[in-house]
Amino acid sequence: MVQYRGQIMPLINVGQVLHGNPADPALDEKHQTVQIVVYMHQGSNVGLLVERILDVVEERIDMQKTATRSGVLGLPSSRKR
């Protein structure tokens, strides 16, 4: 949890959830910084703790309701712009 824009925001370690990594790969020991992607879920902000951020874009996606592995809700469907 961290304070973000005046509210307490939960953090989800993406590497740990998807890959089961027990260590926190996003923590930079020297600078004590982390990379977080913030998104809104059901009216509340949620932080995704990631190893690194390459680029940021805003995109709306359509989700399929089937997933092939535990911890994943669905997969983005293909769509052309």
Image: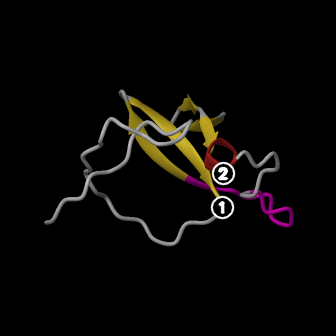
Where is residue 49? Give x, y as percent. Answer: 62, 49
Q: Position of residue 38 (x, y in %)?
A: 48, 47
Depth check: 23 or 74 in front? 74
- Observer-nearest of 78 and 46: 78
Going by the image, does 41 lie left or right of 25?
Answer: left
| Quarter location, residue 56 | bottom left
Please give the range of residues in magenta: 27-36
Answer whether residue 35 is magenta in the image: yes
Which of the two discs, 2 and 1, sits closer to the camera? 2
Task: Return the residue at label 1.
Answer: 51
Q: Report x, y in % for residue 2.
A: 65, 37
Q: Residue at x 29, y 43 (%)?
A: 63
Query: Extreme bottom residue here?
Result: 54
Residue at the image point whose x is 24% and y is 46% from the top: 62
Residue 15: assigned label: 2
* Main SS, magenta residues: loop
Residue 3 vs 22, above or below: the answer is above
Does the segment drawn in magenta span residue 58? no
Task: Please state, as top left, top right, bottom left or bottom right, where the C terminus lies in the image.
Answer: bottom left
The residue that appears at 47% across and 42% down in the rendered structure is 68
Residue at position x 29%, y 41% from top? 64
Label pair 2/1, CB-CB below 8 angstroms: yes
What kind of residue is marked 2? Gly
Q: Residues within 10 Å of mark 1 (few under 14, many from 20)?
A: some
Q: Name the element at disc 2.
A: helix
Mark sitting on residue 16: none
Task: Using residue 35 as the reference point, say whether residue 67 is left or right of it.
Answer: left
Q: Amino acid at mark 1?
A: Glu
Cα–Cα gap, marks 2 and 1: 8 Å
In the rendered view of the protein, which quadrant contains the N terminus?
Answer: top right
